[in-house]
Image (spheres, coloured by chain):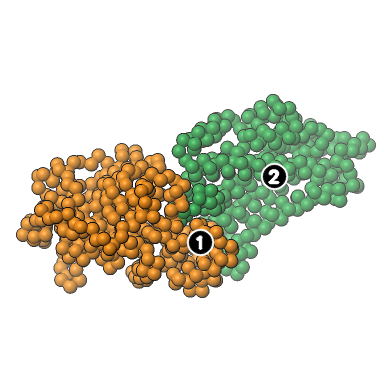
Amino acid sequence: MNPGALLLEHFETRARRRHGRVRRHATLIVGCSVLGLVIVACVAAPLLTAYNPETLDPLRPLAPPFSPGHILGTDQFGRDIWSRILYGGRIDLLIAFGATGVTLVAGTAIGLFSGYVGGWIDSVIMRVVDLFFAFPFFVLVIAIVAMLGPSIFNMFVAIWLTSWISYARITRGHAVVTKNREYVLAAKALGYRHSRVMLRHVLPNVVSFVLIFAMVDAVGNVLLGAALGFLGLGAKPPSPEWGAMISDGQAYILSAWWLSTLPGIAIVIVGVGFSLIGDGLADVLRADG
Amino acid sequence: MGEPLPVPDPAAEEILVVEGLHTFIRSEGGIVRAVDDVSFTLRRGEILGLVGESGSGKSVTCRTLMGLMPSPPAWSIGDVRYAERPGRNLLTVGGAEMQRLRGAHLSMIFQDPMSALNPVMRVGDQIEEAVAAHARLGPRERRRHALQLLDRVGIPAASRRMRGYPHEFSGGMRQRVLIAAAIASNPKVLFADEPTTALDVIIQDQILSLLLELQRDFGMSMVLVSHDLGVIAEMCDRIAVMYAGQIVELADAVTLLTAPRHPYTISLLRSLPDTEHRSRYLPSIVGAPPQLIDIAPGCRFAPRCALAMPECQTWETELIPVAEDHLVRCWRHDDARRPTAWPDQSFA
């Protein structure tokens, strides 16, 4: 361990001793604040910018950041980038929450049931999961979107159809371990119904693992949304979407770096927010468990 | 073997009758005969001790009777009759009926209080859940009942401790909580699977006293599993000694401890440390219990038995009634009680 890490640990222990709860939750709090700010900014976009993200201004294309009237500059069509990032965030956050939320719930439910029930039902479900895993995830998503036709909703469908398997597998693995724990046996010995044992005694002990994964997956889904936008399979122009913005800006990357870089930074900020929440949740749930 | 069959005491009512119980567990190496032809009766209000080495099938017996063995890989045959469900075999009543019986009629305490409580649930919630498992109660009733229970099992400041999580409790306190949960629905039969093995001696004594007290107050019948003969001797009315999945001797506590007839029981008692006549040498039973896969014919204990005859290697006996309420699974039960029959080295 290097001296810096030692020092950090020293301060951490000291801080923890002083106000343990705040210190322990710090990562989570910072993560929630970052993400909260982004959400508020995107929701309150009309209050934060006077520009319509789709209004062209042929007279002022490619204005650099901090130009008068355009704090983050404009793109090749003279559209305000700050306003496009704010409105585009709505789409990307929707992808992060909508796509991840559904797969989180569905995948966890399937995995929990599969692992708890066991036997041939478990085998069948897990073989289906294996089947999905056998396909390259990204190719599968692209294939589904291409088949259904490029749109935000079809992108959701593609993610729903393919992403639940990770959750199912994680939950199933932990459920199999947990259902053989003595407290689950003890719960059964007290005559609780299977549904109760499953939801009250197995699920709370496995949910932390899935939640932490969900945060990573949410970042992944934002990137996936951006990537599909980049490939022209997600949001359709002119509606702003971070990935599509990066894609549109790449032709100008040498002359007008801000077109691609600024939406990229927005993705990074959201990603860091989710990651911090994931880490924070891991800390908090581990400490309680 | 000439003695007449024991006449059952009509006054002592039998609450649980187990006959020819076998539990098999499929494993990679083959089929494990974890419980092999176990028969006993549990009478109302008595404490029956199951004593034996690790792996002798004590816990599996209890879990099978509770319907808690996972199937697959385990399956059981035999006849388990419970007085409150006359004419039915608990092994075949089905999962839903067993679930109704568990907790309300048959309940169980586990060995390790550190792992038998849900770590992410408040202790109070866990007790309230147990209280509400078999009764329709409002939240206030539940809480009152839970408080009463925790109070009854000796948790100080129960209303405050109910808000705590299991990791904030000591081992002894957790075992008390588990006991409270186990008796929450007034079970008739309580299986205590090594309830004090994970605890230190002082706490062990407190928990045993508590169990004894509760057993009397609630009029429960109890099956106490332990590998500790001291605990068993202190607590039990009758004792069953298990070896390699079988009951080898079953008798009332006094008879079993003072006049045992099975060579295994005799060796076991002889290998207890004796603080009065302290010698440098502590006798032990040579060898190890057999693997329960592909069991050789003959008596399970024969390879380690000082009294084994050639016949013992090939012929196995059933439980032989040798006196009233005293069963022994040994051909040489008559010789076993005479010290002269034992080879010299076994008295070293």
In the figure, residue A256 lies in which quadrant? top right
Q: Colour of chain B?
A: orange
Q: CA distance from mark 2 to mark 1?
A: 39 Å
Q: Is residue B32 above or below residue B239?
A: above
Examine the rendering and report whether any part of residue B286 can be seen: no
Q: Is residue A187 left or right of residue A72?
A: left
Let me know if residue B38 appears in the view.
Answer: yes
Which mark identifies residue A198? none
Question: Which chain is disc 2 placed on?
Answer: A
Residue B260 position within the rendered picture, expressed as x and y whole percent measured from the top left: 17, 60
Please state the horizontal and vertical placement of residue B303, each as a whole percent of the image. Answer: 16, 47
Kind of residue sitting beneath label 2 = Phe
Q: Residue at x 69, y 54 (%)?
A: A32
Give the chain letter at badge 1: B
According to the rendering, which colour does chain A have? green
Percent from the top left, x then y, of residue A82? 83, 45
SS at badge 1: helix
Residue placed under numbered mark 1 in the picture: B131
